[in-house]
Image: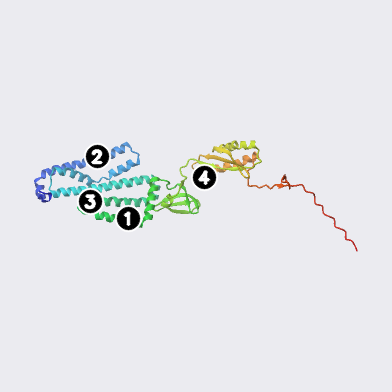
Amino acid sequence: MTAAAVPRRPVWPWVLDNLGDIAIAAGVAVGIVLLLYAVRALILRACKNLGFQHPFAGVVLDAVRRTRPWFLIAVAVQLVQGYLHPPRDVDKTITFLFTVAVAFQAAIWTRALIIGLIETRVGRTEEERRNLSSAVGIIRLLVSIAVFAIAGIVVLDNLGVNVTGLVAGLGIGGIAIGLAAQGIFSDLFAALSIIFDKPFRVGDVITYQGKEGPITGTVMRIGLKSTRILSLNGELRIIGNTQLLAQEVTNFTGRQMYRYQMPFGVIYQTDPDLLARIPALLQAEVESRGARFVNAWLKAFGPSSIDFDFLFEVDETDGGAASKVQEAVALGVLRTFREHGIEFAYPTQTSFTAAPDGSRIMPYPSVLPVVEAEPRAQGHG
């Protein structure tokens, strides 16, 4: 006899005939629910007492807290219904409700885990979360739609609905929407990249390549589609996230040291012994300003100067303070060179006079003085 030919047992007579077994099963189910609640509370308390500090632990705990009572009840009923051997309609109903509970509980857990991970990567301060609220809001909406749509498809499939056409329609619709909003989704994924990879945060000072050249400014807001940067001259620059990440970005925030390179040249008339003393003079000047001397050396013989390269480092986190130290070092070098008679070179050109035979005459050739001729007396005829 096939399954389709199995006669259906009436539900109410079965209930009346098995009241004792149903009562026992209900009591066992209540015990299972209480046990699951106790396990849930034990996990939460143990994690709290152990003081897990890792952000991922907090995400998992938040997902555990979102375990719904109807899911626990569905699990308990599914566990005990096999011992009652209920009629087929009751069995199918219990199995269907269990599937619905599992599908939507899994969607709730998945949503909590994904959004929790995203929020932990957004930032720990309230200001960072507020500035990224628009991007996180749309991400939360998209994640919710995706996970609950999958849960709904699972439920419809268990109801016997042919979901092949629905899945195909959703896929085609998703492709159409993706093509229509390609730029928006591109900037959205770029915003996700900024959130997870953190090349910069709100409040960081960065430099990127603009149309008119490098632009330096402070990141004011990271949005869903664009990032707002307050430049040094006070302009609010708005640039798409995709365009911003497609180029090299320099982040100055968090640096502990500034290195400065100050090349210079001195005149060729400088005494070689004095040239050899220049690195020591520079080192003394740098160290007197609280900076760290790196190196100074004679680099090249230029067209009109003897060229030196000069490197030093300033242990400062603030760019303005480091620039003040750089200025103090530069002014100190000027004073030191003046005290020792060292002259900076500037582009010059010297003209030499040559005699007819090609020999050089310095500075000018000797010439005879020019004597004015006396005027002739005019004769009289």
Q: How packed is label 4: few (under 14 Cα within 10 Å), some, or many (20 or more)?
A: few
Q: How packed is label 2: few (under 14 Cα within 10 Å), some, or many (20 or more)?
A: few
Instruction: Provide the residue designation for mark 2.
Output: 39
Q: Earlier in the sequence, mark 4 or mark 1?
A: 1
Number of marks: 4
Instruction: Provide the residue designation for mark 1.
Output: 175
Along the horizontal axis of the image, is 257 left or right of 42? right
Task: Give the residue type at disc 4.
Answer: Gly
Mark 3 lies on a secondary structure that is helix
Residue 288: x percent and y percent?
Answer: 57, 37
Residue 145: x percent and y percent?
Answer: 30, 52
Task: Estimate the spatial distance between the alpha carbons at disc 2 and disc 1, rounded to whole Å.
Answer: 44 Å
Instruction: Provide the residue designation for mark 4.
Output: 320
Task: Estimate the spatial distance between the alpha carbons at disc 4 and disc 2, rounded to whole Å.
Answer: 57 Å
Mark 2 lies on a secondary structure that is helix
Task: Give the residue type at disc 3.
Answer: Val
Is there CB contact under 8 Å for labels 4 and 1?
Answer: no
Q: Earlier in the sequence, mark 4 or mark 2?
A: 2
Residue 84: x percent and y percent?
Answer: 13, 44
Can I make out residue 132 in this image? no
Front one among 212 and 367: 367
Q: How is the image coloured?
A: rainbow
Q: Earlier in the sequence, mark 4 or mark 3?
A: 3
At horizontal 23% and vertical 50% (from top left) the residue drawn is: 154
Task: Give the residue type at disc 1.
Answer: Ile
Along the horizontal axis of the image, is 355 left or right of 336? right
Task: Estimate the spatial distance between the alpha carbons at disc 4 and disc 3, rounded to whole Å.
Answer: 62 Å
Mark 4 lies on a secondary structure that is helix
